[in-house]
Structure formats: structure tokens, C-alpha cells
């Protein structure tokens, strides 16, 4: 074999090796892209499940009013029921209705809607209520003042 043929053979081998390297790099980039997309999807669903994305997504779950008998008093909570089984229900972003008696006779009582938020304790935006203490559950209409207060508090 002459030197020219040997050089041509070496050049052919180099070209074949480079083609194999390109396929290997494409495969690695593909795997890296799939891993990035999968981790982003997992992060999205974890954030959505934990309630951090509630401000950005409108929920189809109706807001309900729940009356509880807590011994000698009745208490009203409102929120979206996200889980309902035989033992308990779970409210998402719960709040309660605070009713203050009127200052003078003949006036209407002062009703305020409070969210279950506390900056020192930082509770989760869920509340578990056992069914044995529930008096009634009622879905609220869209034009209810509780719904408006609920939307204002969750902005």
C-alpha cells in the first residue's frame, strides 16, 4: 500500500468515528431534555398539590358553607371541599364567619369573613373536619357575599 492509500484509509476511519460521536451526543442531549421536562412536570404537580399555584389557576370546586356543633356553640366555616369520605372532609383555604352583635338595639349584626391564616404558625391551607360534628353543608351561589370575601382573601 502506498502512503496515499494509507492516508485515505485513516481519513475514512476518522469520519466514521465522528459520525458515531454525533449520534452519541444527540442521544445524550435527548435524554437530558427528557429529564428536564420530567422534573419540571413533577415540580408543577407538587406545587399545585401543595396549594402554591392556587392564585394562578381558577378552581371549579364550589365553595361550601359548613356548620359545626362544637359543644355549646355553633361555628360556620367556608372553603372548597377537596376530599369527602365517610369519616371526615378536608377544606381547602378555609375561613370562618365572625358575627358580632349590634352595638345598639335594632341594628344589624356585624358579619366579617376571616381566613385561617396566621403569620406566626403558618398553617397549611387545608382543614380536616370530622363528620360527627357537622350539622349541615351547603354549597354557596356565585353571588354570595361569602364567595366575594373568599375571592378577595385569596388574591
Image (cartoon, helix red, strand yellow):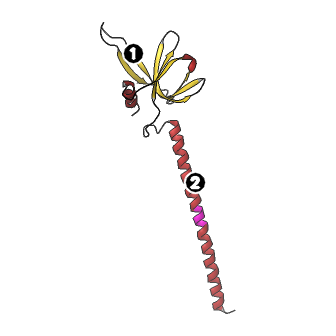
The residue at which mark 2 appears reads as 35
Residue 95 colored in magenta in the image: no
First in residue order: circle 1 vs circle 2: 2
Q: Residue furthest bottom?
A: 2
**Magenta highlight range:** 24-28
Q: Which quarter of the image is occupied by the C terminus?
A: top left
Percent x, y of residue 56:
42, 40
Q: Which quarter of the image is occupied by the N terminus?
A: bottom right
21 relative to 110 in the view: left or right = right
Q: Residue at x 39, y 22 (%)?
A: 113
Query: Does the magenta stretch mainly form a helix, a strand or a loop?
Result: helix
Depicted 59 relative to depicted 76: above or below: below
Q: State the image quarter where residue 20 is shown.
A: bottom right
Element carrying mark 2: helix
Element carrying mark 1: strand
Q: Residue at x 55, y 57 (%)?
A: 33
The residue at which mark 1 appears reads as 99
Percent x, y of residue 37:
54, 52
Percent x, y of residue 47:
51, 40
Mark 1 Cα within 10 Å, few/some/many (few <14, many 20+)?
few
Q: Is residue 117 visible?
A: no
Q: Residue at x 57, y 55 (%)?
A: 34
Depicted 68 relative to depicted 91: above or below: above
User: Whole-Å distance between the Cαs marked 1 and 2?
Assistant: 53 Å
Amino acid at each position: 500500500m502506498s502512503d496515499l492509500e494509507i492516508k485515505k484509509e485513516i481519513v475514512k476511519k476518522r469520519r466514521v468515528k465522528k459520525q458515531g460521536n454525533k449520534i452519541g451526543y444527540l442521544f445524550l442531549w435527548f435524554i437530558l431534555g427528557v429529564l428536564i421536562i420530567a422534573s419540571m412536570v413533577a415540580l408543577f404537580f407538587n406545587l399545585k398539590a401543595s396549594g402554591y399555584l392556587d392564585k394562578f389557576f381558577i378552581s371549579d370546586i364550589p365553595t361550601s358553607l359548613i356548620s359545626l356543633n362544637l359543644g355549646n356553640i355553633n361555628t360556620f366555616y367556608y372553603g372548597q371541599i377537596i376530599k369527602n369520605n365517610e369519616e371526615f372532609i378536608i377544606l381547602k383555604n378555609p375561613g370562618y364567619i365572625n358575627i358580632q352583635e349590634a352595638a345598639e338595639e335594632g341594628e344589624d349584626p356585624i358579619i366579617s369573613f376571616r381566613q385561617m391564616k396566621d403569620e406566626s404558625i403558618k398553617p397549611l391551607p387545608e382543614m380536616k373536619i370530622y363528620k360527627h360534628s357537622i350539622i349541615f353543608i351547603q354549597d354557596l351561589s356565585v353571588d354570595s357575599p361569602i364567595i366575594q370575601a373568599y375571592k378577595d382573601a385569596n388574591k
